Image: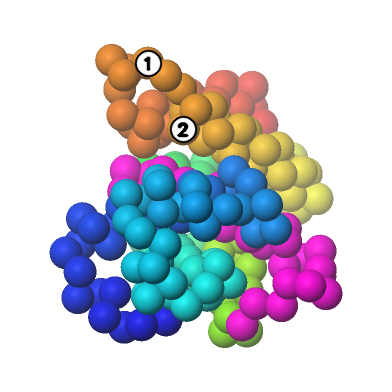
Amino acid sequence: MNERFFDLKKDRQDRIINGAMRIFAQNGYRHASTDEMVAAASISKGLLFHYFKSKKGTWEFLYEYSTRYMLLELREAGRRRGCDFFEMYRQLVRADAAVLQKYPYMPLFLRRADEELAAGDPKFKPEIPEDLAGAVADLRLDLVIEAQRPPFLSEQDARRISQMLEYTRFGLMQELVERKDENAKPGHEQYAERFSEYLQTLRKMNI
């Protein structure tokens, strides 16, 4: 990418990032349209290619940027390794909410991007640092598995509950980015409140 992208004002950087990320998250790499990206970001296609050279270059930048950004937001959760199972999830909810406040599509983009990487499409061979591929999902799973579980909750069950919560997490994020109610609370606030309620329900059930 062209490093001069970072010379832009931060709000313009974020508008470009969010616009392109939304199109990739919604459509996947193969069906993502650069015309839709530039329309979402309110820039010209020439400017998009000036900074990222191609659709593939845009995807690669977004993947690396998103991974590094989310790993930073997970620092606090990482410092709490080995804490109570539900406390760890509270830390993860806080990290998610902080990300969603600035980049509403980032977790959804990364999830879809990781699925595309795992599929191994021979026509899609992105160049990303090897240590970043799947790094966010791997760290989240490690933190959950290492958390202190209730005595009756096996590691296998913890993995299953974690998978269930991940489906809930992404489903809730998808619902919130698609909502039309402009008078509702911001999406990151609704996410934090509702996911915390789900965790409280599980805890009441002695899970």
The numbered mark at residue 134 is: none
Q: Which residues are magenta?
A: 98-127
Residue 98, horizontal then vertical, whole percent: 33, 48
The numbered mark at residue 181 is: 1
Asked if disc 1 and disc 2 are in contact, CB closer than 8 Å, the reply is: no
- Number of other residues with Cα within 10 Å of mark 2, as a class: few under 14, some 14 to 19, many 20 or more: some
Residue at coordinates 38% horizontally, 27% vertically from top-left? 190
Is residue 147 found left or right of 120 in the rendered image?
A: left
SS category of the residue bearing label 1? loop
Residue 129, horizontal then vertical, whole percent: 57, 84
- Give the Cα distance between marks 1 and 2: 11 Å
Q: Closest to the observer: 14 or 200?
A: 14
Residue at coordinates 57% horizontally, 57% vertically from top-left? 110
SS category of the residue bearing label 2? helix
Question: Which residue position is annotated with label 2?
Answer: 177
Amino acid type, residue under disc 2 in the picture: Val
Q: Closest to the observer: 170 or 6?
A: 6
* Magenta segment includes 73: no
Can the viewer see residue 42 in this picture? yes
Amino acid type, residue under disc 1 in the picture: Asp
Looking at the rendering, in which quadrant would you find the C terminus? top right
Residue 89, horizontal then vertical, whole percent: 51, 45
Residue at coordinates 56% horizontally, 22% vertically from top-left? 201
Q: Closest to the observer: 124 or 72?
A: 124
Dominant secondary structure, magenta: helix
